[in-house]
């Protein structure tokens, strides 16, 4: 596993609060962000030849739930058609929610590789894919519906 950037959580909080256009460290480039207001969030970064992401839960402030880094030995998707492929998926238990039969105590994160796609619709949220990568986060057992938007 690659070394995590020391400012990963701090930079993630800044992206959640101010968006992907926030000034950032030159070696930690924000790729994607998904925020469910007042609940959970995830931010995906490029750091050298690795993807790094941080997941947050809101409890009076955005608290880091976990940091992950993986080397990217990934070839981009090719072809004329718009494509989305799942590259990584993780889950953890919530610190702010108790067990529930619908799985609301579970926090899932999915990293997606996108080709010829400007944005993804995840449930009622829009996630931009300016660098060909997206991250999505959700609670519960079932993943939300994903649709492609090229606007």
Image (spheres, grey):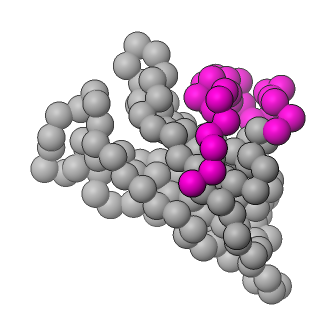
Farthest residue toward the top?
Answer: 60
Residue depicted at x 79% and y 71%: 116
Farthest residue toward the bottom?
Answer: 79
* Residue 40 position within the rendered picture, expressed as x and y whole percent measured from the top left: 44, 35
Residue 114 appears in which quarter of the rendering?
Answer: bottom right
Compared to residue 78, the image places residue 112 above or below, namely above
Total marks drawn? 0
Side of 58 where 75 appears, left or right: right
Pick the quarter of the image with the C terminus.
bottom right
Side of 21 where 108 appears, left or right: left
Q: Is residue 21 visible?
A: yes
Q: Nearer the viewer, residue 50 or 59?
A: 50
Extent of the magenta region: 1-27
Farthest residue toward the right?
Answer: 26
* Residue 141 position within the rendered picture, expressed as x and y whole percent measured from the top left: 28, 57
Pick the quarter of the image with the N terminus.
bottom right
* Residue 95 position within the rendered picture, expressed as x and y whole percent measured from the top left: 28, 30
Q: Is residue 123 visible?
A: no
Q: Nearer the viewer, residue 129 or 29?
A: 29
Residue depicted at x 63% and y 23%: 10
Residue depicted at x 64% and y 72%: 84
Q: Nearer the viewer, residue 111 or 8?
A: 8
Is 21 within the magenta? yes
* Residue 45 position within the rendered picture, expressed as x and y whole percent measured from the top left: 69, 45
Q: Nearer the viewer, residue 104 or 55?
A: 55
Is 69 within the magenta? no
Compared to residue 96, the image places residue 142 above or below, namely below
């Amino acid at each position: 596993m690659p070394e995590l950037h020391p400012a990963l959580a701090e930079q993630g909080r800044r992206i959640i609060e101010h968006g992907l256009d926030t000034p950032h460290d030159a070696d930690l480039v924000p790729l994607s962000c998904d925020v469910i207001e007042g609940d959970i969030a995830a931010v995906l970064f490029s750091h050298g030849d690795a993807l790094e992401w941080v997941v947050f839960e809101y409890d009076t402030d955005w608290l880091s739930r976990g940091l992950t880094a993986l080397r990217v030995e990934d070839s981009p998707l090719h072809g004329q058609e718009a494509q989305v492929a799942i590259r990584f998926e993780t889950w953890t238990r919530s610190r702010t929610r108790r067990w529930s039969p619908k799985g609301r105590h579970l926090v899932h994160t999915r990293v997606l590789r996108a080709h010829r796609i400007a944005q993804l619709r995840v449930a009622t949220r829009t996630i931009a894919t300016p660098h060909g990568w997206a991250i999505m986060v959700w609670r519960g057992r079932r993943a939300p519906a994903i649709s492609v938007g090229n606007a």
